[in-house]
Image (spheres, helix red, strand yellow):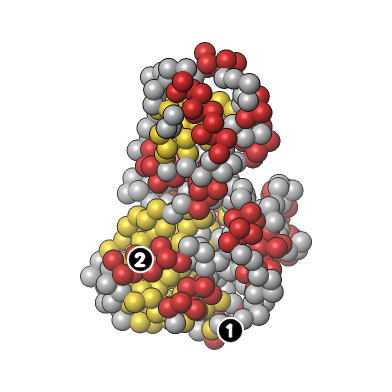
Amino acid sequence: MTVKEMTAKNLTERVLNKNEVFILDVRNESDFNDWKVEGENFEYLNVPYFELIDGIEPIVDKIPKDKEVVVICAKGGSSIFVAEQLVEAGFDNIYSLTDGMKAWSEHLYQAKVYEDEEVKVFQFVRVGKGCLSYMVVSEGEALIVDPARFVDKYKDAAKEEGATITHIVDSHLHADHISGGKMLADQTGANYYLMKSEGATFEFKALENHEKIEFNKVQLEVLAVKTPGHTPGSVSFFVNNKLLFSGDTIFVSGLGRPDLGNKVREWANDLYNTVHDKVSDIADEVIVLPGHYADFDSEINKDGYIGDTLGNIRKRNEKMFNTPKEEFLNNVEKSASSVKPPNFEEIVSINRGMESADIEKMQELEIGPNRCAVHHTE
């Protein structure tokens, strides 16, 4: 019996359209509680696969017949088995998520963020991980910001715009996913920029030596050389005085965690100075485009991308911008006790060029949720 399959792209469309979908997740309870497909109008039932090997009778009365039902497992095999049983039991609208959570982790979708007579800006949303990357296009050239390892996505997008990728920047050394910066630079010949203080061992252009990067009608300002906090070499990029690519420093609903280097108090102090000294001078109407999001449904805006004006972010996170320094530091220290990104030390080592990994290893290391945006204000 052939079971209908739903791709990660199809499921993402249902998230964006706020469709009603019933998710039957057959992974272990701990895996489901740690990380799942999230949609505003999704309902969930988590029953481990091993409880259904002898039949689906225990869940038959819990599965709706008037909604799409998507069965999800880690890699797509177990979900097909369970979906087949549901179809045999007379259920319609039953789907298996193709390649499971592995595929969900890797899917990117593209949204247009901004366009004027000088530039066009696209956001790439890795919806299963909460990671965001960008392409800035101007007169046949493209700049890529914080690329994921799926480099063909950016090459195809640039080709679609009739542009050549000439510049690539990473706002910091990522801890929750493998950067595509060096791979993309190797394949395109583009200039690749990273802070020298992040400790990468391969060849790149040090952002410490570039207060500005300019091409065609793009002026990218490396904000005050660096905006530390999440990592000591984190930077923000200010484009044409209109767009702030904030990396993992400022999010729509909070700040990047500054505890991954085990110097939480010291780095939290840097983060405070970034927010109160450097960002405070930026105008309210500037659009902030972060490197991650924490909650898709609350952070996606009416225009279909993750981002907001700095003025709105200031209002939304009033405590973040007005809290006295000692209270700010104490709050960040409390948040630092939360779970760190899985495998973050090995991922950082790969992103530094100190270790290598094949595709299967990269997939294994990246499985799990985003945990870079954990310091949020209420």
Looking at the picture, tell me which residue is in the foreground, 245 or 162. 162
Left or right: 87 as drawn, with respect to 340: left
Q: Quadrant of residue 152?
A: bottom left
Q: What amino acid is at disc 1?
A: Glu
Which residue is identified by label 2?
A: 156
Looking at the picture, tell me which residue is in the foreground, 161 or 199. 161
Distance in Å between CA atoms under marks 2 and 1:
25 Å
Which residue is identified by label 1?
A: 203
Q: Quadrant of the N terminus?
A: top left
In x, y percent, where is residue 276?
57, 63
Work out which residue is located at the far front of the displayed protein and give it.
Answer: 1
Left or right: 25 as drawn, with respect to 334: left
Q: Earlier in the sequence, mark 2 or mark 1?
A: 2
| For residue 262, above or below residue 52 | below
Mark 1 neighbour class, 10 Å CA radius: few under 14, some 14 to 19, many 20 or more: few
Q: Quadrant of the C terminus?
A: top right
Q: Report the mark closest to the observer, 2 or 1.
A: 2
